[in-house]
Every structure is written in structure tokens, then in C-alpha cells.
């Protein structure tokens, strides 16, 4: 018990000798409310499987495949293992180092006596040695704390990478669906224009229309037909990008036909700005790096003070195996050493200043991460609100353009208007349909952006 009490007292004494600043979270007061929110609403944070709110089984499968095979995510997971191994390395100096060794030698020496002669003999030496650096100034503890904080930063980085991959898969998938919708719109409009051209050709033969009307419609058909290959190219490039995101070769990747129409629109709510900062993995990563840098300052400052090393070794030494383990063959040594840095050409002071400057750099990075997180949510909220309004307005424009096109066709066949009016309403409908598909994509991607800005389903 006396030894235990002495050990505890020594531990407390050593803990009090740690040098360097204690870490305190920087104070960055968040705003009281979001600008883009008209009224405060209870927080509805994203769930861990937030993408399921879009109601697309195909998207669910793509994200599951990305979680399994995405290369960026695999690299991030490996970095976490690296950081955890560094924690084990940094923990080792806090414990004594113990080594076992054994040696057997045979020597032959010349005897220093008249007439000379030689002497041959064997020596056997099994030995156990221990060493320990007394962490009086807390340098080793600070180094371990820095490694732990770095590991925490690496774990947060893995979550950030995972969230980036998931949102990239969703964005790219929606882009592929939008291009499929654009292709269908273009093909439907081409088919409609070709049907009109066939009717005009028949009318020309019977003399009820002119060659100019036919030529104008032929130009319209050619223009619509020329717009299809670029869409097909964009779609293939998007599918290739999606294949890479899910860890597949583009040649082996297939995507079933789909459409943006009918997808769900989940509605997360950001709550208060002060609640956001605890849910952003990039903010957590920035703070963990700041904590590690603060611990590095403690390590650098401890280098100004002396180090105390304790070593001990013990074993047996004998010239004959049969007497090796006898009490008279026992050997041991005990040593304590103190080393005080005197002159290192400014290296120690330079390392201390480097650690302080690194902390200042990461403090600025942390501040930027916090205000960027707040800005991301504001941008996402505005995008969700405005694209929803734009989508509704564009849907009205499509409905109006479709009604105008049908009326123009009826009046053209009745002979009350010419083909130019039909072509004008046809172009207006095609443009409105194409714009609506683009706005639908922008709205869905704004929802994905809001999930991303809210930190996905991550919880600290």
C-alpha cells in the first residue's frame, strides 16, 4: 500500500508539471436565426440514410455500392487506421521499454607470462534490460494527446469523405435522369415535327400548302435531330462518372432507364444555427486538428526542459553453462541520467515557434470552417426555396405552351394561320419542357446540398 500511494502521488505530481497552454474551444458566436427561414421551425436533422427520402430504389442501390467500393472512401478508411496506429506509437513512450537478449561467445587470448601460451574460454550472457523516460514535463502525454486528436480528425475526415461521395452519387444520378428526360423530350418533339412534316408534304402534293412551308418544317426537323447526339454524349459521360463513384469500370456499368418525375422531395429543417456546428464533420475535423496543434505546442515547450532517463538491466554471466543460473553468476546495473539542452543552434526555439504558427494557421482554418458551415446552410436554404418556386412557375409555363401548341395545330389545319405560328409555338413548348427538366434537377440537387450542409446523418 505505501508503494501504491507513492506511485499515485508521483503520477499527480507529474501531471501538474505539464507545460504549455491548455486547450479552450475558440468562441465564435453563431447568428440567432437563419436569414432564409421565414419562421423558426423545430430541427428535423437528416437521418443516417437520408437519401431514401427521394424514394428511388435505384439510388439506394447505387449508394450502397459506393459505400462498399468507392476508392476515395476506402482511402479515407485506411487513413483512419494509420492514425489509430500512430496513437499506439505515441502511447509507447509512456510505458517502460523492456528488451531481452542472450549472447554466447568463445574467446582465445594470449597469456601475458614468460613462455606465452593461450587461454580459450566460453562466455554466456542472458540479460533483461528496461528503460524509461520520466515524463516530468508532460511531453510524452502531450504527444499522445496530439495523436489522439489527429485520429479523431481522421475519423471526421472519413465521415466528410463519405458524405461527399454520397451526395456526389445522388447529384450525378439525378443528372443522368435529367439527361434521360431531356432525350425523351427531344425525341418526342422530333417525332412530332416529323409528323407535321409528313402532313405538309401531303398538303404540298395536293396544292394546299407551299414548298416554303415544307422547307421551313424540314429545317425544324433537322435542328431537333441535331440536338440529340450532344445529349447522348453528355448522358454517357455522366454514366461514366457515376460508374467511377460506385467503384465500377464504365464499360461494365449499366443504369436502368428512369425519370425525375415522381421522385420524392424530403424536407429537412436546420433548426437553429447554434445546433448546426455540432453536426458538421468538417467542423469537428478542424477542431480536432486545432487540439492536436495545441498539444504539439506543449511538446515543443517541454523540449526546453531537462529529460530524465532511467535504465536497468539484469541477468546472468558465466563461462560455463552448468553454473550460469547460480547466485554468483547474477549481474545487474542501474542508472539514471539527466539531459539539459544547452545549445542546438536555435532548433528547439524554432520548433516552438513553428508549433505556435501552426496553431494560429489551424485556428484560422477552424474559424473558416465554422462560418463556411453557416454559409453553406444559408445557400442551401435559399436554393431549395427558390428552385421550388421556379419549378412551379416553369410547370405553369409548360402547361401554357402545350395549350398554345395544340391550338395552333388545330387552327393551322383549319387554314386560319400559317406554319410559322405552329413552328413558334412548337419551339416554345420544347424550350419550356427542356427548362422544366433543368429546374427539376436544380431543385433535387438543392435538396441534396441541404442534406450535405446539415452534415448528413452524422452525429458526434
Image (spheres, rainbow, N blue to C red):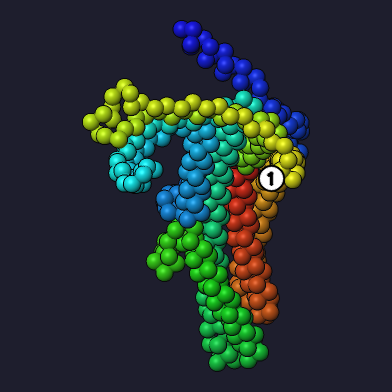
> Which residue of the protein is positioned furthest toward the front in this rendering?
114
Q: Is residue 379 above or below residue 178?
A: above
Question: x%, y% of residue 282?
Answer: 62, 42
Q: Tell me the residue that label 1 is attached to.
A: 376
> Which residue of the protein is positioned furthest toward the top in this rendering?
1
Q: Is residue 172 above or below residue 143?
A: below
Q: Residue at x 39, y 43 (%)?
A: 112
Q: Is residue 340 left or right of residue 60?
A: right
Of the 4 image quadrants, the one containing the C terminus is top right
Mark 1 residue element = helix
Q: Residue at x 64, y 53 (%)?
A: 391
Asked which quadrant contains residue 207, the reply is: bottom right
Question: x%, y% of residue 352?
Answer: 72, 39
Question: x%, y% of residue 118?
Answer: 31, 46
Question: x%, y% of residue 43?
Answer: 62, 31
Q: Is residue 293 left or right of residue 153?
A: right
- Is residue 170 among the parts visible in the rendering? no
User: Who is closer to the viewer here, 232 or 92?
Assistant: 92
Q: Is residue 178 above or below residue 11?
A: below
Q: Residue at x 53, y 68 (%)?
A: 237
Q: Residue at x 49, y 26 (%)?
A: 334
Q: Is residue 132 left or right of residue 435?
A: left
User: Who is closer to the viewer here, 110 or 343?
Assistant: 110
User: Who is closer to the viewer here, 150 or 433?
Assistant: 150
Mark 1: few, some, or many residues within 10 Å (few <14, many ≥20)? some
Q: Is residue 391 above or below residue 277?
A: below
User: How many numbered marks appear?
Assistant: 1
> Which residue of the protein is positioned furthest toward the left in this rendering?
322
- Is residue 430 among the parts visible in the rendering? yes
Amino acid at each position: 500500500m505505501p508503494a501504491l500511494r507513492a506511485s499515485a502521488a508521483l503520477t499527480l505530481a507529474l501531471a501538474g508539471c505539464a507545460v504549455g497552454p491548455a486547450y479552450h474551444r475558440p468562441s465564435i458566436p453563431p447568428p440567432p436565426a437563419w436569414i432564409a427561414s421565414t419562421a423558426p421551425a423545430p430541427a428535423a436533422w437528416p437521418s443516417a440514410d437520408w437519401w431514401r427520402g427521394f424514394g428511388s430504389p435505384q439510388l439506394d442501390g447505387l449508394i450502397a455500392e459506393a459505400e462498399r467500393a468507392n476508392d476515395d472512401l476506402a482511402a479515407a478508411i485506411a487513413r483512419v487506421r494509420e492514425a489509430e496506429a500512430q496513437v499506439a506509437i505515441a502511447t509507447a513512450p509512456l510505458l517502460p521499454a523492456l528488451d531481452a537478449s542472450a549472447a554466447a561467445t568463445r574467446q582465445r587470448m594470449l597469456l601475458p607470462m614468460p613462455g606465452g601460451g593461450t587461454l580459450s574460454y566460453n562466455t554466456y550472457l542472458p540479460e533483461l534490460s528496461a528503460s524509461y523516460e520520466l515524463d516530468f514535463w508532460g511531453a510524452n502525454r502531450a504527444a499522445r494527446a496530439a495523436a489522439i486528436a489527429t485520429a479523431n480528425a481522421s475519423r471526421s475526415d472519413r465521415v466528410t469523405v463519405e458524405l461527399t461521395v454520397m451526395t456526389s452519387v445522388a447529384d450525378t444520378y439525378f443528372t443522368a435522369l435529367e439527361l434521360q428526360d431531356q432525350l425523351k423530350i427531344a425525341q418526342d418533339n422530333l417525332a412530332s415535327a416529323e409528323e407535321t412534316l409528313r402532313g405538309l408534304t401531303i398538303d404540298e402534293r395536293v396544292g394546299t400548302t407551299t414548298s416554303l412551308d415544307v422547307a421551313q418544317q424540314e429545317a425544324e426537323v433537322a435542328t431537333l435531330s441535331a440536338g440529340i447526339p450532344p445529349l447522348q454524349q453528355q448522358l454517357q459521360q455522366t454514366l461514366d462518372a457515376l460508374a467511377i463513384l460506385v467503384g465500377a469500370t464504365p464499360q461494365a456499368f449499366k443504369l436502368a432507364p428512369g425519370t425525375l418525375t415522381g421522385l420524392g422531395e424530403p424536407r429537412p429543417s436546420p433548426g437553429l444555427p447554434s445546433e448546426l456546428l455540432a453536426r458538421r464533420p468538417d467542423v469537428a475535423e478542424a477542431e480536432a486538428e486545432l487540439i492536436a496543434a495545441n498539444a504539439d505546442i506543449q511538446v515543443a515547450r517541454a523540449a526546453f526542459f531537462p529529460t530524465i532517463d532511467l535504465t536497468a538491466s539484469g541477468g546472468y554471466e558465466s563461462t560455463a553453462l552448468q553454473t550460469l543460473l547460480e547466485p554468483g553468476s547474477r549481474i545487474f546495473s542501474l542508472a539514471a541520467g539527466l539531459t539539459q539542452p544547452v545549445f542546438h543552434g536555435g532548433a528547439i526555439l524554432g520548433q516552438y515557434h513553428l508549433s505556435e504558427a501552426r496553431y494560429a494557421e489551424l485556428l484560422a482554418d477552424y474559424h473558416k470552417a465554422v462560418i463556411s458551415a453557416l454559409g453553406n446552410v444559408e445557400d442551401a436554404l435559399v436554393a431549395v426555396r427558390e428552385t421550388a418556386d421556379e419549378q412551379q412557375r416553369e410547370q405553369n409555363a409548360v402547361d401554357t405552351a402545350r395549350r398554345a401548341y395544340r391550338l395552333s395545330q388545330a387552327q393551322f389545319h383549319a387554314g386560319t394561320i400559317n406554319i410559322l405560328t405552329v413552328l413558334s409555338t412548337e419551339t416554345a413548348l420544347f424550350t419550356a419542357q427542356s427548362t422544366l427538366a433543368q429546374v427539376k434537377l436544380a431543385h433535387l440537387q438543392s435538396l441534396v446540398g441541404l442534406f450535405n450542409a446539415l452534415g448528413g446523418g452524422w452525429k458526434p
